[in-house]
Amino acid sequence: PPRLINLFKRDGAVFNRLPFEISKLPEIYKTRENNSPEKALPLVLPVVVNGRIESPGMPDFYSFSGKAGEEVVIETSARRLGSPLDSWLAVFNSAGEKLAENDDDPQYKWYGELTHHSDSSITLKIPKDGSYLIKLKDLQNKGGPEYAYRLRVGGKLPDYEAWAFPSGLTVPRGGSGSFRVRLLRKDGFNGPVIIALKSGSGSGLIIDHAVVPEGKNEALVNVNVPEDCIEGVKTFTLEGLAVINGSVAIRPVIAADEEMQAFAWKHLVEAESMVILVGKPAPYAFSYVLPENKPVDLMQGNESRIRLNISRAKDFAEPLQLQLTGAPEGLAIRNNFIGKEKDNIMLILRADWKAKPGPAEILLTGIANLVVPDPANPENKNRRERIYVSAPLLYVNVLKGKGPPPEARQKKEAPRPAKDTTPEKLPGTKTQVTAEKPALETTGEKLPGTKPQVTAEKPALETTREKLPGAKEQVTVETPKKGERNGSK
């Protein structure tokens, strides 16, 4: 991935940090004009081309040979590296037919400080042996020396980047905190990624069960602070571990903070490091009683009961309110109040039919109101302050429920409409059935738009013989007498 580097002059002057990217693939430079299909620069795959759109409105063309069934990735890196290029890619076959095109690769929309991501990417399965043409241009028809790009063309290179946020945590001694890890999966990599402390980093801290599951891009990670940990600020470094094509791929986890752009898009902006402030012990802490420390199985439409223990300081006996923080859709808790002096509770965790099957993390937070000194009025014994303490992450495995969702059952078991008097053929039936229409009566009622009470007489009905549309035989219906309308003659 692109990294930010600092350049120094010999006299000590420092340049601004600049993005920089290297690759293990062969690299070439575009050395001649290739602004038409006839002048396309031939490529031997895999390769990375370092080029630029030198003149406004002038595209670059490249050609390569492909074999049927091969998957070829064509990707630009430009805006990520500080280039103003708004790239657009297209691939054509030898007959000039467009096979694929792309403007912006959506997976980079949250990436770093890119308020307008515009790098392009195409993954093409070669339909048949032959020659293929790549067209690369600036979508806004601009160009110049600064419109540089790196173009990667070749087979898939499964990989990932990992980002952790927020970069700063505050956790009491003996407590736990959590942060979120987000993956940028590349070229089809879909496997699980373990998140761990880098060797020699974060002395005393413990990270447990930290994994981004297969097929998911985000997960919460728990960090525990032992009771004997020294108070103060600690920095720590994380790394990801995954198996890709039979080899272990270890990648740095980038410390970051989530920032919002113009009240809409959120971006992960790189920070210097992960930092944790170890504070004084909280007056209470939580722990779960779980069999063999395995994820809790929870079926859609059902509940599971989990014992939650509360460790209280000697002078703390206040009641606690429990809440889920950032819970996945469809998961909720019941029995979330802990009475005064109680040291355990049977927590009820429920999954409705909106909960997605698969692994999920539950972050439970306890809230207490503590009496705190009032500097302005020392005699005030009613001044209270809320304190929040998180429990360790609870890992659950949502199982697919048996049978249809409750809404589907209700719809299926909905009562049939009342039958009425008129013989008619109901849709989908082969025989005549009788439906009863309610008899009309004369009642006193208030007509819309009138102030005084008036009597609206409903029309007397008479019986006539007529043929209903679509009916094969005569049936009896009731219609108003001639000359009667809206209750008047």
Image (tube, helix red, strand yellow):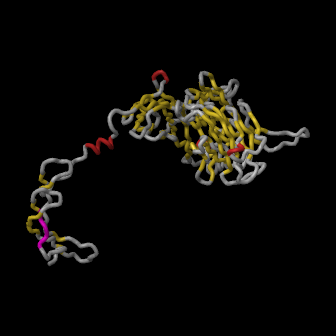
Q: Answer yes or no: is residue 173 visible.
A: no
Q: Give the range drawn in magenta.
A: 477-481
Q: Answer yes or no: is residue 440 visible.
A: yes
Q: Position of residue 415 (x, y in %)?
A: 22, 47
Q: Looking at this view, is 375 or 22 the one in front? A: 22
Location of residue 411 with respect to 24 vertically, above or below: below
Quadrant in which the N terminus appears: top right
Identify the residue at image location x=70%, y=47%: 36
- Is the magenta region chiefly helix, strand or loop? strand
Q: Looking at this view, is 195 or 470 the one in front? A: 470
Location of residue 360 with respect to 374 vertically, above or below: above
| Res 240 quadrant in image | top right
| Res 299 quadrant in image | top left
Identify the residue at image location x=15%, y=70%: 458
Q: Where is residue 206 in the image (x, y as percent from the top left)?
A: 61, 27
Quadrant in which the C terminus appears: bottom left
Location of residue 338 with respect to 417 vertically, above or below: above
Q: Position of residue 17 (x, y in %)?
A: 78, 42
- Specify whether residue 479 is painted magenta: yes
Q: Position of residue 77 (x, y in %)?
A: 69, 41
